[in-house]
Structure formats: structure tokens, C-alpha cells
């Protein structure tokens, strides 16, 4: 009825307009854009937006200034300039802005006058910041600590410049969506809702049928309904309905409402609008639908969009069948909430993502493995460097960790660490990281100089770093440790531990001498072992030192020197390596041998509880034995590769940067017999294995550890046969796992996966391999009645369990075709020495362990944190007695009698500008994960800051832009359909201002801003 009346009014209006035009001259039409929400009618929320990638086909700066436009005509400055002008033209117009990396670049160039106007636009709600991190981060290949950091950086900028707190998550483009995004980077930020576009095409079809595109998402089993979020999935994509895109060169017909001109089309266009609205309303609950009015790098000429939207709002509302309004996702969310509807419940996540048959976006879980490792390594370093910056005291001038913070933030973008950017853009992210690292390295060096008592007064004028660090240690290159030692000159090694608990582990450094002794912090000699550098390692070193430093390695390392170090929580220990005198004992050189035939055809490695058994003839791992807990399991490890599908378009879908589409699988086996080489000694055993010229593996078994460390070197992947290849590692056991395996979400919660199955719909299988791949950031595990097999990783990789009892991880990819998703380049990475380029070689580690069932979590969580936060090593040279006599050799930033419980990590300890301190504590276990550690745990703040007087502790939301209690107070209540299982959620209580004890429940992260009554350094 409503519609018929509306149509009548429109027809009358159109006739009147026509009559009127015949009588008078055409004149200015004042479009009525004032509409708000109208009850009992379909409301079309027009949300003007621009999706601005923080690097993809061009670098972030090229996109900002509009450089390199031959690749893509995109200039974010134009977007912001023209949007602001368009908003000032009409106070009913609205716009959302998302990526703070771009907004900051623009903001600092504006005049005070314009800044004042923009602040008014923000205060009035015309311009709204949503999402509000530095970038729209990827959700598959990112670590939760990086996600928190990058969001905090953006949110605190918005808070300090505008006093605003973003309310909405806007992850419209990332290629699948994680559980951690929903609860941690959503609800725990204080967001009221989350919106995005990309989910599996089969899932989308079913949700449209059931009007289930909008859901209440509970991402965490542990935090359940206490961290749920209203989530809206767009019915098609994040651009407007067909026919409603209005950038200058877009082809949608504009509304032509001037009768003096040809092609008057108001009625036709209004009909199109109403039809598109009704179509969407048919798949959406409530009277509210959202149109995302924009897409990639649009609004470079904003008037073009706003002119059309003004007219549509004016004429559509005159017509009256539906109501159109300028809106934002916040207004839309409030309208959804006010409707008092019940919503379907969503748990788990939205991985993997396929946009059609044979197109699973699971390749990017591994794409650009070296960049992925670099990002992860820098992330761990950044965490430690901020602690050391805090201990030293932040300087208003001089080096800081800020550049590294920025570089890391940008690297979380969904075309950065994801590996889906062009090569020159990947190089740009790496360059930014290295610049940030260089500066943070100075902060670390000067902090260690201060903490060791090397200098009492720290000024930057004399900041030549006394402490060198070795970022190329992974390719056995470390000039200070390789230097020749003399009686007058020993090597001083500081090992810094960023974790809140004491740790003991083996470190390895390259050395050139074979008669060395190692002393601990007390000057006592400790056991050490020399392992000759393999030829494969030396080749890697020689080539990559040239490739990265553009010069030859200046020293000649011959051995790895390995010894065990013990380091206090948030502190360091000192170790000294000296040249051994003839009379002294010295490092033990490993025995090196090739296993020989024997009756059992087996040999064993391992000096402690863990033993690995190999066959002599094939050199194959066969058994994993732990003498402590009587585990004796069949275990094999192998490599294979997929040859990539060589398609040319979306129908003949190729394997590429985004999509994994295997053509065939091939085992990687040595041609003929390739014997293993074993190095054995008191600290560790190594098994070297080289199945072919481009694959080399070292398996390490440490005497005092119960896991095996597998270091792989892969590349250059040969492609001269015309096929791209994707290299995988398999761990094969005899566990009966019934199609079930577990993978982490952004390094945090583990999610149960069932092969060939989705919990939300009946899966139609087209790609039995690619469609079972999931992103892995921390690890993957399997379990049966008696055992658990866990594998932890050192960077983001894709992985699966394609056969019961087996784990598969994709480690490297080199492909020859573009996969037709926009990047327009084949993923064919190279490393070059001058103009001589070869396919990229990567090196990395997997960590593997088998436990009795129910005992694996302890290792996955505790050791997993150690993988993320490796010991930070710094080197100096000095006469040994001089150093030991005049320096602090052991330090802990916390009370010496205290240690954090093993289920708690300090994930942020950072001095903010102005002297306050940002502290984040994370419980590392989920509910029910471990009988000892999945419990409410407390941390004593007074013991974390023993030398300081805490005067105020304010609990904040996750991104530290508002107080937690305020967030909880304004949290929207949503109704869930049916009777969902309601777990009792435990959370830590309010912190008593006198006792200052923080409680953390399983999976809880708590964020505090702490004020001290003075800030003095520990050393003073
Ligand atoms: Zn994008």
C-alpha cells in the first residue's frame, strides 16, 4: 500500500515538474538531503567510503601522493582533499575514513584553519573514523600482538587529535576473517559492530537464503558472550549495487534531471534504486540495509559521488517507496540494535575463503615467506626494544622505537604481510622495517649500555653503540662473534629475555676459532660445544651477505659455538667467550659421522630424554621417544611439492599470490642414496640431510629440551620445467585423528578443524587439498586417545591435516602465473647479487613434540611464547676481568624474588610520550586447555615495578583509547536466536588501588596505563 501511494505521488510530482518546466526557465534545485531514519519502510543507509590500500600495486607513499600513476591512477591526497570540501558544502553529507597511515600523512600537511574545520566535521559526525588502525590489517597471517599494536597506534592518534573513539570494525577487504578479529580486535576494543565482504561463496549463498548475513559472533570459547560482536557481511562485495558507482570514469548512468537536456531519466533511475534496495532487503533482516557507496581509491573527485547521492536521496524520498539517507556504519548499527531483533549465532571463524569453485585463497597463508618471517622477527624485537626503552627512559630527542612501530603497523596491511602485493611494494615494506630496526637497535644498545653500567649518564651525543647486534645470525653471520679473540679481548654477550619468567635455552653464535671457553655471569666456566658450519650453511652465508650488505663477509666463521644460557625475567645475563689457553679445557668439538649399517638398520640421536630414531639405509626418521614420559611414537618427516596450476584467467584458475590451486603432488626424494651427517656433542645433536640441491635440513635435539627443532633451507625452487612449485613438509604419525586437527587464530585461540567439513554449511568439495588449508601463526596439533602431536612455526604458514595422523605445512612458493585477483604479477621472488638474480632461498624452523594426551598445551603455550620472543643477543669486546669487575652482569627489571606465572606474558611494556606506561598482560591459556594453567592467575604490579612508586593504575580497553569501565557500560546488548550454550565466563576483578594485584582469567588480556610518582631509571 505504502508503495502504491508512493508511486502515485512520484507520478504526480513528475507530471507537475514537467508542466512547470514548460512554463519557466530551469533553475537551481535545492536537493533535500536532510532525511533521517523513517520507521516502517526500507531505509537505505548510503555509506560513502573509499577503500585505500596501505600499499598493494604501489607503495603506501606512492598511493598517497599519486605517484606511479601509470600502474594505477590513485592518489589518496585527492580523496581527502575533495571529501573534506564536499562535506563542507552540505552538512547532511557523511563520510567514513579508515586507514590512519594515510590520514596522518594528510593531516600533518594541513593548515590550522583547515584542521579546525575538519575537527568540526568530526565532532558533528559528518566525518567518522571507523576501524581506525594504521591499516586494515590482514587476519590470516598476522600475530595478535601486532594487530593490537597497529590498532593502538591509530586509535591513540584519533583520541589525541580528535578525542574520538572508533565504534565500528571495518575489515571489508581481508581474505577471510579470524576469530581473534571478532572478539579481541572487535569486542575488546569496545567496537559495537564489525563489517566485511569476503566469505566463502557457498557460505554466502546459504546465508542469503536464510537472511543470516548479519550475526552475533562469539569468536572465543573462553570469553564467549562477554566478547561477542554484531557482525554484518555484505551480500555481494564492498562496492555499491550495480549501476551506482560514480567516480568520474565509472560507467553508471548519472541521474539526469534537467529537462532542457536530453536523456532525462529521474523516474528510471529511481526505479533502479528501489529495485536494488528491495533485492537487498529480501536477504536482510529488519528494515535497514547498507549500501557501501565507494570502492578502491574512490572519491578522488568526491563531488561526482555526492552530486549523485544528493539527487538519489532527494528523488527516492519524493517517490517514497523506500527511504534513502546519508549514513555511517555506526548509525546503521544503532538502527539494527533498536530493531530489537534476534540474530543468528556465529562461532569459530571464516577461513578458508573461496570466491568461487577452485579458487581457495589459501596460498597467501604462505606467500612471501621471507617477508612473513621478517615481520614476525621484527615484532618480537619490537616488544623487547620497547621494554629496554622503558628501562632506560624515553628521550624526547634521539632514537626511539617509533619508526619500527610505524613500519610494523603498515606491514600488517592485508596486502603486506599477506604477500599479495607487487614485488616493489614488498621491498618497500622490508625497507621500512629495516629503517625502523636500525633506529630501535640504537635504543637497545644504549639501554644495555646504561643497564650494564657501561655509562652512568646517557646522552645521545656519545651514542656509538657499544653493543653490536646480529640481524643476520640466521645465516650464520655475526662480525663481533667471529672476530679473533686474544688475551686482552674477550667476546661479551648479553642475552636479554623479554618474557616474565626465567628461561634456560641454548644459544648458537658463529665463531672462527676452535679453542674457546665460555664463562657465565658469575665468571664460572660452562660447557660449550662447537659444530662445524656445513658447506650448505657457508654457501647460504656467502651469497646472502653479498645480497643483503652488498659486500663480502669480512670474517671467516668456521663453527657454531653452542652453550646453554639462563636468563632472569625481563632481564639479562652476561656470557663471556674467551680464547682458551693451552692448559685450559675448552669447547668440545662435536663428533661428526655418517651412520653405518647395523643389524637393526637404525641409529639414535639425542643426549637427554628425547631420542629420535632414524633408518641407516634411507636416513628416514622413524621414531620419537621421550624417556621421561614413556612416549614412543612412530614419526616420519618428509617433503613434497605441488606443481601449480598454470591457468590464465578465473576459469582456468592458476595458483598464485592469493590462490592455492595444486595440479599434482610430488614427493621430494633424493636420487640414489644420500647419507645423513650427524654431529653429536654434550649440548645438542644435529642430523643434516640434503635430499636435493635446493633443499637442506638440520634436525636438532637438545639435551635439555624435549622437542625436535627442524631447520629448513629451501630454494631456489627450480621452475625451468615451466611449472611453479609449492613446497610442503609433512610430519607423519600413526595417531588416529578422525579427520580432526587444531590450528591457531592469529597466534592465540586454537580452533578445531575437521577435514572436508564446515560447521556452517554442507561443504561441496572441489579442491580437497587447498580447501582444507588453514592459516597457522603459532602452531597446529593433532590428538587421539593417548597422544598429541604438536608442530610450532616461526612465521605465518598455511597448513592442514590431509590424512589422519599427518600434519602438512606449506613452507615456500614460487609461481609463474598471476592468479587474476588484481596484483597482476606472478609470485616469483628472487634474491640478487648485483644483476645476478636467483629464485629466493628461505630458511626457517619448525618445532615438533609429542606428548601424552592433555599435556601438549603447556609446551605449545610456554615454548610458543619463547619462539615469538627469542632471546635478544648483543655483543661487545673487552678484557674479561675488566668487564666482570666493572659491570652489572645480571639484571632483572622486576623484583628479584618474583617471576610471572608461566601462563602470563607481558605483551606490552612501553613508556608513552609524557612518562606514563602502557602495560598489557595476557593469559596464554584457553578455558579447559590445561589442568594446571587454565586458571585464574594473578600478577603483582608492585613486584613488576620494584623501584617505582605507582600512584595510579587505569584499566583501559585493548587499544588504550578509553577506560575499560566506560566501554563495559555502553556495550550494546544483542539477542541471539535459539538457546545458545551459555558458559559461565570468568574474568579478573577490578584492580584494588592499594594491593595492585591484577587477576587474569583464561584468554584474558588486560591493558593498563600506569602513572608513577617519578620516573627514574633502574640503574640510577
Ligand atoms: Zn584492499
Image (cartoon, grey):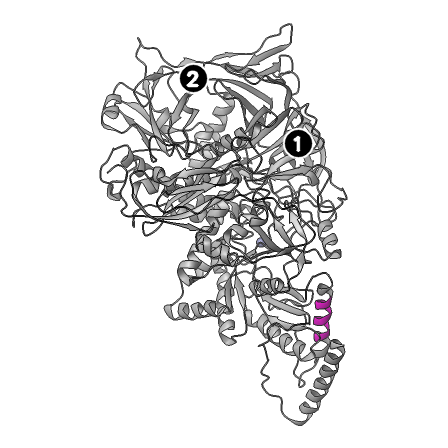
Q: In terms of image quadrants, where is residue 777? A: top right
The answer to whether residue 273 is magenta is: yes
The verdict on label 2 being within 8 Å of ligand 1 is no
Using the image, determine if residue 285 lies above or below residue 667.
below
**Element type where label 2 sits in the image:** strand
User: Mark 2 — residue?
Assistant: 530
Magenta stretch holds residue 920: no
Label 1 element class: strand
The residue at 71%/53% (across/down) is 204
Tell me if I can see residue 722 in this picture: no
Q: Residue furthest bottom?
A: 23
Disc 1 marks which residue?
Answer: 641
Indicate whether 394 appears above or below 782.
below
Give the residue drawn at x 41%, y 67%.
Answer: 115
Q: How far across and down, in percent of the image, does residue 46 sit?
A: 61, 68
| Badge 2 or badge 1: first in the primary sequence | 2
Residue occupying image coordinates x 71% and y 65% = 281
* Relative depth, front residue between 240 and 193: 193
State the residue in front, 741 or 146.
Answer: 741
Whether 120 is drawn above or below 643: the answer is: below
Chief secondary structure of the magenta portion? helix
Along the viewing direction, whichever of 518 and 55 lies nearer the viewer: 518
Range of residues picked out in magenta: 270-278
| In the image: residue 733, left or right of residue 608 | right
| Residue, far top | 599
Q: Nearer the viewer, mark 2 or mark 1?
A: 2
Amino acid at each position: 500500500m505504502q508503495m502504491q501511494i508512493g508511486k502515485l505521488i512520484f507520478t504526480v510530482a513528475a507530471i507537475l515538474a514537467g508542466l512547470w518546466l514548460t512554463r519557466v526557465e530551469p533553475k537551481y534545485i535545492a536537493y533535500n538531503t536532510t532525511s533521517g531514519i523513517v520507521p516502517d519502510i526500507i531505509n537505505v543507509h548510503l555509506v560513502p567510503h573509499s577503500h585505500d590500500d596501505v600499499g598493494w600495486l604501489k607503495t603506501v607513499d606512492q598511493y598517497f601522493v599519486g605517484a606511479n600513476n601509470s600502474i594505477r591512477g590513485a592518489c589518496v591526497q585527492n580523496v581527502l582533499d575533495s571529501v573534506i570540501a564536499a562535506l563542507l558544502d552540505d552538512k547532511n553529507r557523511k563520510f567514513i575514513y579508515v586507514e590512519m597511515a594515510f590520514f596522518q600523512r594528510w593531516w600533518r600537511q594541513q593548515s590550522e584553519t583547515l584542521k579546525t574545520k575538519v575537527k568540526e566535521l568530526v565532532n558533528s559526525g559528518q566525518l567518522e573514523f571507523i576501524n581506525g588502525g594504521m591499516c586494515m590489517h590482514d587476519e590470516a597471517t598476522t600475530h595478535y600482538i601486532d594487530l593490537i599494536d597497529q590498532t593502538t597506534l591509530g586509535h591513540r592518534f584519533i583520541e589525541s587529535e580528535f578525542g574520538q573513539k572508533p565504534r565500528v570494525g571495518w575489515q571489508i577487504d581481508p581474505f577471510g576473517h579470524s576469530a581473534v578479529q571478532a572478539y579481541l580486535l572487535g569486542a575488546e576494543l569496545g567496537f559495537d559492530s564489525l563489517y566485511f565482504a569476503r566469505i566463502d561463496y557457498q557460505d554466502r549463498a546459504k546465508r542469503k537464503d536464510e537472511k543470516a548475513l548479519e550475526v552475533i559472533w562469539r569468536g572465543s570459547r573462553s570469553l564467549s558472550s562477554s566478547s561477542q560482536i554484531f557482525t554484518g557481511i555484505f551480500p555481494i562485495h564492498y562496492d555499491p549495487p550495480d549501476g551506482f558507482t560514480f567516480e568520474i570514469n565509472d560507467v553508471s548512468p548519472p541521474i539526469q534531471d534537467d529537462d532542457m537536456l536530453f536523456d532525462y531519466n529521474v523516474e528510471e533511475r529511481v526505479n533502479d534504486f528501489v529495485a536494488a534496495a528491495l533485492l537487498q532487503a529480501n536477504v536482510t533482516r529488519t528494515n535497514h540495509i547498507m549500501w557501501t557507496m565507494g570502492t578502491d581509491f574512490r572519491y578522488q573527485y568526491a563531488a561526482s559521488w555526492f552530486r549523485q547521492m544528493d539527487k538519489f536521496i532527494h528523488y527516492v524520498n519524493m517517490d517514497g517507496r523506500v527511504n534513502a539517507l546519508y549514513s555511517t556504519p555506526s548509525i546503521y548499527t544503532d538502527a539494527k540494535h533498536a530493531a530489537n531483533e534476534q540474530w543468528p549465532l556465529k562461532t569459530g571463524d571464516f577461513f578458508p575463503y573461496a570466491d568461487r569453485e577452485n579458487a581457495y585463497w589459501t596460498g597467501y597463508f604462505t606467500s612471501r615467506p621471507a617477508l612473513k618471517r621478517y615481520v614476525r622477527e621484527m615484532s618480537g624485537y619490537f616488544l623487547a626494544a620497547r621494554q629496554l626503552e622503558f628501562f632506560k627512559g624515553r628521550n624526547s630527542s634521539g632514537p626511539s622505537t617509533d619508526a619500527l612501530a610505524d613500519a610494523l603497523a603498515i606491514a600488517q596491511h592485508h596486502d603486506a604481510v599477506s604477500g599479495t602485493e607487487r614485488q616493489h611494494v614488498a621491498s618497500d615494506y622490508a625497507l621500512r622495517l629495516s629503517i625502523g630496526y636500525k633506529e630501535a637497535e640504537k635504543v637497545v644498545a644504549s639501554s644495555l649500555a646504561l643497564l650494564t653500567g657501561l655509562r652512568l649518564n646517557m646522552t645521545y651525543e656519545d651514542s656509538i653503540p657499544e653493543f653490536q647486534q646480529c640481524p643476520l645470525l640466521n645465516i650464520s653471520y655475526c662480525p663481533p662473534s667471529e672476530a679473533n679473540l686474544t688475551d686482552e679481548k674477550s667476546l661479551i654477550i648479553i642475552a636479554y629475555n623479554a618474557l616474565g619468567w626465567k628461561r634456560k635455552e641454548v644459544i648458537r653464535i658463529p665463531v672462527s676459532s676452535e679453542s674457546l671457553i665460555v664463562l657465565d655471569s658469575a665468571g664460572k666456566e660452562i660447557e660449550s660445544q662447537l659444530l662445524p658450519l656445513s658447506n650448505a650453511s657457508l654457501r647460504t652465508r656467502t651469497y646472502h651477505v653479498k645480497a643483503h650488505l652488498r659486500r663480502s663477509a669480512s670474517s671467516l666463521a668456521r663453527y657454531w659455538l653452542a652453550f646453554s644460557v639462563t636468563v632472569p625475567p625481563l632481564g639479562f645475563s652476561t656470557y663471556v667467550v674467551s680464547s682458551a689457553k693451552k692448559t685450559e679445557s675448552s669447547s668440545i668439538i662435536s663428533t661428526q659421522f655418517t651412520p653405518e649399517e647395523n643389524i637393526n638398520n637404525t641409529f639414535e640421536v639425542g643426549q637427554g630424554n628425547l631420542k629420535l630414531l632414524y633408518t641407516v639405509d634411507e636416513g628416514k626418521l622413524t621414531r620419537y621417544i621421550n624417556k621421561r614420559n614413556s612416549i614412543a611414537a612412530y614419526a616420519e618427516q618428509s617433503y613434497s611439492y605441488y606443481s601449480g596450476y598454470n591457468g590464465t584467467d578465473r576459469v582456468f584458475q592458476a595458483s598464485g599470490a592469493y590462490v592455492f590451486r595444486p595440479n599434482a603432488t610430488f614427493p621430494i626424494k633424493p636420487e640414489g642414496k644420500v647419507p645423513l651427517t650427524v654431529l653429536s656433542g654434550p649440548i645438542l645433536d644435529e642430523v643434516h640431510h640434503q635430499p636435493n640441491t635446493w633443499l637442506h635440513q638440520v634436525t636438532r635435539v637438545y639435551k635439555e629440551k624435549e622437542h625436535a627443532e627442524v631447520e629448513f633451507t629451501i630454494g631456489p625452487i627450480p621452475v625451468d620445467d615451466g611449472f611453479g612449485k609449492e613446497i610442503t613438509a609433512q610430519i607423519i604419525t600413526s595417531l588416529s585423528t578422525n579427520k580432526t586437527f587444531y590450528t591457531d587464530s592469529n597466534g592465540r585461540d586454537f580452533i578445531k578443524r575437521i577435514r572436508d567439513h564446515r560447521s556452517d554449511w554442507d561443504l561441496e568439495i572441489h579442491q580437497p587439498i587447498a580447501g582444507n588449508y588453514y592459516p597457522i601463526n603459532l602452531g597446529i596439533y593433532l590428538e587421539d586417545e593417548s597422544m598429541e602431536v604438536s608442530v610450532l612455526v616461526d612465521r605465518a604458514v598455511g597448513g592442514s591435516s590431509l590424512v589422519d595422523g599427518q600434519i602438512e605445512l606449506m613452507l615456500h612458493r614460487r609461481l609463474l602465473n598471476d592468479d587474476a585477483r588484481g596484483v597482476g604479477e606472478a609470485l616469483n621472488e628472487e634474491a640478487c647479487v648485483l644483476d645476478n638474480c636467483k629464485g629466493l632461498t628461505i630458511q626457517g624452523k619448525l618445532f615438533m613434540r609429542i606428548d601424552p594426551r592433555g599435556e601438549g598445551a603447556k609446551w605449545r603455550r610456554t615454548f610458543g611464547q619463547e619462539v615469538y620472543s627469542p632471546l635478544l643477543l648483543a655483543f661487545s669486546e673487552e678484557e674479561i676481568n675488566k668487564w666482570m669487575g666493572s659491570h652489572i652482569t645480571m639484571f632483572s627489571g622486576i623484583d628479584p624474588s618474583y617471576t610471572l606465572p608461566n601462563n602470563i606474558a607481558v605483551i606490552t611494556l612501553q613508556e608513552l610520550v609524557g612518562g606514563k606506561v602502557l602495560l598489557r598482560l595476557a593469559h596464554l591459556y584457553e578455558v579447559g586447555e590445561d589442568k594446571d594453567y587454565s586458571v585464574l592467575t594473578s600478577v603483582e604490579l608492585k613486584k613488576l615495578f620494584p623501584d617505582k612508586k605507582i600512584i595510579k593504575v587505569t584499566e583501559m580497553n585493548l587499544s588504550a583509547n578509553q577506560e575499560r569501565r566506560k566501554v563495559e557500560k555502553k556495550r550494546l546488548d544483542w539477542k541471539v536466536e535459539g538457546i545458545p550454550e551459555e558458559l559461565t565466563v570468568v574474568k579478573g576483578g577490578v584492580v584494588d588501588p592499594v594491593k595492585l594485584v591484577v587477576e587474569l582469567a583464561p584468554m584474558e588480556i588486560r591493558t593498563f596505563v600506569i602513572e608513577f610518582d617519578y620516573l627514574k631509571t633502574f640503574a640510577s
